[in-house]
């Protein structure tokens, strides 16, 4: 009797198993990477959509505000032409000063209800009001309110100016009557 022992080394099967395991791990890794990137892409798409919505909303709000001012100015100044002229003048002015356009237009609109000189008088007063606002630390709207009080009821009515020393700086004296 003859016993034959055969020991074979199957290298091809080992390589196939190793490659299969490696590909399986790599596939799971690629799927995980795809999930991570998909999430980031989804977040970017949502963020972009929200930004576009916010920009569109701000354009609509600005257009609405512009129309509101033009309607008010037409009523206060008596014509569409004068309302547009003041609107355009204040737009130019707003580009030169550190105040928001909305606040400048609110101030100019308030002045239009008080000043009889129309656009030209408002145009003359707005730089003075802007300077007073900068010096006093008040907003341009509060400063306009104080100027209107001075214009309609006298310097003593401008309490915020009195408290901040603006009346004294402008040369007004308490208790003086004419």
Image (tube, rainbow, N blue to C red):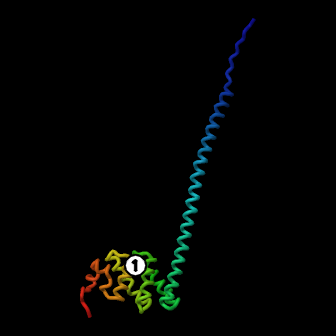
> What is the quadrant of the N terminus in the image?
top right
- Residue 134 image point, x, y percent: 34, 76
Q: Nearer the viewer, residue 120 or 149?
A: 149
View extreme (top): residue: 1
- Residue 29 image point, x, y percent: 60, 41
Q: Nearer the viewer, residue 109 or 40?
A: 109
Q: Is residue 119 above or below residue 63?
A: below
> What is the quadrant of the C terminus in the image?
bottom left
View extreme (bottom): residue: 178
- Tell me where residue 100 sits by quadrant: bottom left
Q: Does 7 sit left or right of 177 as displayed?
A: right
- Residue 107 image point, x, y percent: 42, 81
- Residue 136 image point, x, y percent: 32, 76
Give me the residue at 41% from left, 78% from top.
96
- In terms of secondary structure, where does tag 1 sit? helix
- Tell me where residue 13 sits by quadrant: top right
Q: Nearer the viewer, residue 18 or 173?
A: 173
- Tell me where residue 158 sits by quadrant: bottom left
Residue at mark 1: 141
């Amino acid at each position: 009797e003859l016993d034959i022992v055969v020991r074979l080394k199957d290298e091809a099967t080992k390589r196939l198993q190793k490659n299969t395991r490696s590909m399986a791990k790599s596939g799971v890794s690629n799927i995980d990477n795809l999930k991570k990137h998909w999430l980031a892409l989804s977040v970017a798409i949502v963020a972009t959509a929200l930004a576009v919505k916010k920009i569109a909303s701000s354009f609509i709000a600005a257009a609405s505000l512009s129309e509101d001012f033009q309607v008010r100015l037409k009523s206060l100044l008596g014509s569409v032409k004068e309302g547009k002229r003041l609107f355009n003048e204040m737009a130019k002015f707003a580009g030169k000063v550190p105040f928001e356009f909305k606040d400048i237009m609110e101030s100019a609109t308030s002045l239009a209800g008080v000043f009889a000189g129309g656009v030209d008088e408002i145009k003359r007063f707005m730089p003075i009001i802007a300077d007073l606002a900068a010096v006093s630390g008040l907003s341009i709207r509060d400063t306009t309110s104080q100027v209107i009080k001075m214009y309609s009821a006298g310097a003593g009515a401008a309490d915020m100016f009195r408290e901040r020393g603006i009346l004294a700086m402008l040369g007004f004296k308490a208790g003086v009557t004419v």
